[in-house]
Amino acid sequence: MKKHFAQFYAFITEQQSWFEQHLAADFEQSWDDPVWVCGSNGSGWLRGNGKNKLRFDEIGRTKGIEGRHAVAEDYARFMKALLVLVYRRRNRSISPAVAVATLMILKRWYHSLFEVTGQTHPVYLTTGVIQRSMDNLSAASSLGDPNTANYKGRCVSLQKLVNHQSFTLVTLQYVSDGQYTNQTNLTRKARETMALKQQAKLSDTTTDGEDALITIRGFLNIVALIQRVESDAEKIALNCLLLLVITGFRSIEAFNLRQDALFKRQIDDPALCKRFQDKGLPDYFLGIRYVGVKGAGERTHWVEPLAVPLVESIFSTVKMLTAPIRSHLTYLRAKSFADYLPQAISNMPGEQVELDDVVKYITQTTSSFRGRAGQRDKTSKALSKRGVLPAQEIPGPKKQQSYLLFQD
């Protein structure tokens, strides 16, 4: 029995250390807090959609469990550790809904553990305890409730994680009597994905007609654009288009990406790391933090390993192309948007600005007709239409005129 307790505390220590090292920095709660906030009010790894709290010190109002019950400290630590482990096993991602469902199952285990054995420590968990907890759930649920089957399926998954740690006195062997995934609640795309997974072999030439994400013609057009873009704005738009194709982001999700959206996660498995290196792939996973639309909250998109160099190149290129724009915006914020003139104009002495400087620093045209004279003419006419007239005219060489304009 001492061996089992030692393995249990080793498991708790490992998960707590991993929590402190990888999750605590941007998470508002600490490991010892009795409540972790998740959802839209949460932070770090538990931020997402909805508003929920993960309470570890008691069992509140729960279907099939009467009254409130205090939770022993060791079991509370066990629930926290298992949540962290679930996060790690799910490719370092967990939604608030999954976190809440996981905690509810573990609390049901605790209630049945105390009822059946009178014990509160997780090492005393047995198959009978888990079976009783799921039987209580079934008795309190309506017949055919799809959520019940999903809870039982998730219960089996958690049981596997516990068995892998080998700290219980007996091996847990609970078997769900229902199908884990409720097909009726799945979207059309989810059902199609599951059908694809069940196929013995996938065809690499099938496009499913109108359901294809991108046609061959569309892809070739994008490739052709690479040789045609000229201005910085066109290059930025093209890189954004490439990112949309690679990630499947909605356009608004791509537009709202931050400069520091990319982050790396080192591959923990040495064998997998070596396999990546042998294939010439980066020895790390690349994630993109983004804000999902429709209230999805902050999420992470993990980039396909083959696309990692391209995504990194896209971010690097866009940062370089947008540097002048970002610098100008920073300057405007620094002076509280007193005006919208670029810094080069504001730094000029006096109250007047020459037309050539307006052409150089403010206006932009893709037309090369008549060269510099044409740009001056178009700029002068554009300013005149907006009521900005020259304050002084100074004759220039070759009968040209240089306009001086008042700065507003």
Image: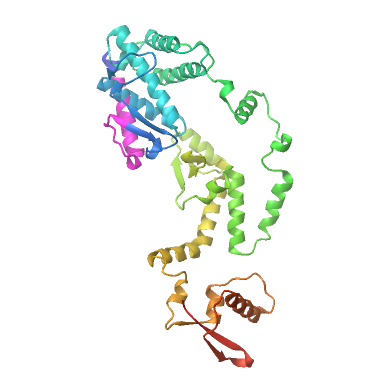
Q: Is residue 399 above or below residue 275?
A: below
User: Which residue lies at the image location 35% right of the left edge and 30% below the top edge?
Assistant: 53
Residue 69 quadrant: top left
User: Which residue lies at the image location 60% right of the left edge and 92% below the top edge?
Assistant: 397
Q: Is residue 401 left or right of residue 22?
A: right
User: Which residue lies at the image location 68% right of the left edge and 56% below the top edge?
Assistant: 225
Residue 88 position within the rendered picture, expressed as x and y whole percent measured from the top left? 42, 31
Residue 365 position within the rendered picture, expressed as x and y whole percent measured from the top left? 62, 71
Q: Is residue 336 above or below residue 97?
A: below
Q: Is residue 25 magenta?
A: yes
Q: Is residue 136 magenta?
A: no
User: Which residue lies at the image location 72% right of the left edge and 37% below the top edge?
Assistant: 210
Q: How is the image coloured?
A: rainbow
Front in this rendered view, residue 256 or 167: 256
Q: Is residue 11 left or right of residue 86?
A: left
Residue 8 position within the rendered picture, expressed as x and y whole percent measured from the top left? 31, 21
Residue 270 quadrant: top left
Residue 317 position within the rendered picture, expressed as x and y whole percent measured from the top left? 54, 57
Residue 62 visible? The answer is: yes
Main SS, magenta residues: helix
Q: Is residue 117 left or right of residue 140?
A: left
Residues shaded magenta:
6-35
Residue 209 quadrant: top right
